[in-house]
Image (cartoon, grey):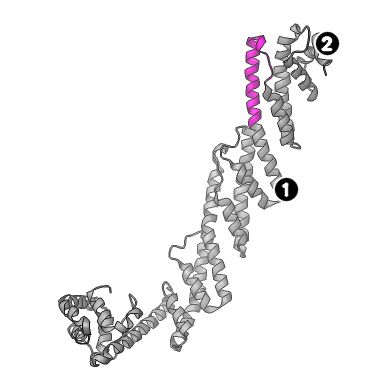
């Protein structure tokens, strides 16, 4: 009760114990006189000392609020004064202090018994924590032990259910569980803390599993791995529970095996690069799986990079063929052909996909485009090998390319005279 009546009660009657009063605590019940608000206020004015004048000035307001509290059924402060109404002013404040302490104890006992019977433990753990620590009121200590045993069992079941569902602990049940468990034993406290840590992680687990499932249906180029993938897996690896071990595998499968690996392969095959920067995460996740997977991820991401470069090379080759066909003087092999192929040979050495792609791009550069270059350039080579013809000759030899349309052009006398010899 935060009103004039309560303020007056605390200030006048409990000056010696103002710090002991808490909101919501019941006053003492039983014993003493049944007292009216009027009598209580009169006694407080009588024994209020230097505060009496101010209380007397606000008497009507204090009276009204006292009567309103009583009408609501809250007679705590009034009953405390009633126990001490016949005391002298010298003993009045000390008496009320003890009465209020007894009232608080009775309310705490009632709260503990009700919580035990109903299995509703919110806000009760603090009460028992203080009582067990004080260890003076054996009746309350015994009641608290019964409550604590039931609370730990019940709240553990609730938190476990929330963890398995990925439900948020909106009522801070874990705070109560950890406090109750601490009152049982150090071992129980450790178990409670571990379970609650799993509960907190379970929210991210649910989010990751739901989001990766949704992302699996998205276009590869638009997919960005949830940032929680790595952090959630790392949190789960710290868990000592079977739930943690199982979910760690589930998260890694969802993020890496079923999403990241599939997306990287699609990105490579699309040849559009990595717009979502997924490779950065893929390599980190792969390291959690095995050294072999980490090696695969690094090579696969290099393939994604090479695939984009090869896409650009193919576009340049198409453009060069069109220009050379229209104007023979423009017949040339784009510099990207040699550069991209040489870079790919370094970056994806040992890749079967890479070998096949290099062969395809080499064919595009030195056979499909090469035929046009040779057709437009060889007849005019009287005194030396044209630079672009030489590139076709070198490329065809390096990659062991043969083609019914290309072979006769490579056998042209000018090519033999000026280009083959130059090698």
Dot 1, how many residues are within 10 Å of its Cα: few (below 14), some (14-19), or many (20+)? few
Does 422 lie within the magenta span? no
Q: Is 176 rendered above or below residue 222?
A: below
Judge whether residue 75 can be spotted in this image.
no
Residue at 74% from the left image edge and 27% from the top image edge: 359
Predominant SS of the magenta segment: helix
Quarter of the image where one finds residue 321: top right
Read off the magenta span: 308-333
User: Could you tell me if the residues under marks 2 and 1 are in contact, i.e. CB atoms within 8 Å?
Assistant: no
Does 327 lie within the magenta span? yes
Q: Is 22 rendered above or below residue 235?
A: below
Q: Where residue 236 sits: x, y (%)? A: 60, 59
- Give the structural element (helix, strand or loop) at label 2: helix
Residue at 28% from the left image edge and 85% from the top image edge: 80
- Give the structural element (helix, strand or loop) at label 1: helix
Circle 2 is placed at which residue position? Answer: 417
Is residue 324 found left or right of 212 in the rendered image?
right
Judge whether residue 52 can be spotted in this image.
yes
Which label sits on residue 10? Answer: none
Quarter holding the N terminus is bottom left
Circle 1 is placed at which residue position? Answer: 292
Q: Gap between marks 2 and 1, in whole Å?
A: 51 Å
Quarter holding the C terminus is top right
Q: Where residue 394 sits: x, y (%)? A: 78, 21
> As drawn, which residue projects farthest toward the front?
50
Residue at 61% from the left image edge and 36% from the top image edge: 267
Q: Where residue 103 sits: x, y (%)? A: 33, 84
């Amino acid at each position: 009760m935060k009103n004039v009546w309560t303020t007056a009660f605390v200030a006048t009657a409990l000056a010696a114990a103002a710090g002991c009063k808490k909101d919501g605590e019941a006053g003492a019940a039983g014993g003493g006189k049944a007292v009216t608000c009027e009598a209580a206020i009169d006694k407080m004015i009588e024994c209020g000392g230097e505060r009496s004048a101010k209380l007397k000035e606000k008497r009507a307001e204090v009276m009204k609020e006292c009567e309103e509290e009583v009408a609501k059924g809250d007679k705590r402060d009034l009953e405390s004064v009633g126990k001490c109404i016949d005391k002298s002013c010298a003993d009045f404040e000390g008496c009320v202090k003890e009465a209020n302490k007894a009232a608080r104890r009775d309310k705490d006992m009632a709260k503990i018994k009700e919580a035990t019977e109903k299995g509703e433990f919110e806000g009760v753990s603090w009460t028992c924590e203080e009582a067990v620590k004080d260890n003076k009121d054996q009746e309350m200590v015994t009641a608290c032990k019964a409550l604590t045993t039931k609370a730990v069992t019940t709240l553990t079941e609730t938190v476990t259910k929330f963890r398995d569902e990925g439900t948020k602990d909106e009522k801070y049940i874990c705070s109560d569980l950890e406090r109750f468990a601490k009152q049982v034993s150090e071992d129980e406290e450790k178990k409670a803390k571990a379970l609650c840590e799993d509960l907190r992680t379970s929210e991210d687990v649910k989010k990751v599993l739901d989001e990766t499932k949704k992302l699996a249906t998205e276009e590869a180029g638009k997919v960005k791995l949830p940032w929680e993938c790595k952090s959630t897996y790392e949190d789960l690896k710290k868990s000592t529970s079977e739930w943690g071990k199982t979910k760690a595998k589930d998260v890694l499968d969802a993020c890496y095996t079923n999403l990241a690996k599939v997306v990287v392969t699609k990105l490579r095959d699309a040849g559009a690069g990595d717009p979502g920067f997924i490779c950065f995460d893929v390599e980190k996740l792969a390291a959690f799986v095995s050294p072999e997977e980490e090696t695969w991820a690094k090579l696969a991401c290099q393939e994604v990079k090479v695939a984009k470069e090869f896409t650009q090379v193919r576009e340049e080759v198409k453009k060069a063929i069109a220009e050379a066909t229209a104007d023979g003087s423009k017949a040339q092999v784009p510099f990207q052909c040699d550069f991209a192929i040489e870079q790919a040979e370094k970056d994806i050495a040992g890749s079967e996909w890479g070998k096949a792609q290099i062969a395809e791009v080499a064919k595009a550069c030195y056979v499909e485009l090469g035929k046009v270059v040779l057709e437009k350039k060889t007849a005019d080579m009287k005194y030396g090998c044209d630079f672009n013809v030489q590139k076709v000759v070198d490329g065809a030899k390096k990659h062991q390319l043969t083609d019914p349309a290309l072979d006769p052009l490579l056998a042209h006398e000018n090519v033999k005279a000026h280009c083959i010899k130059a090698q």
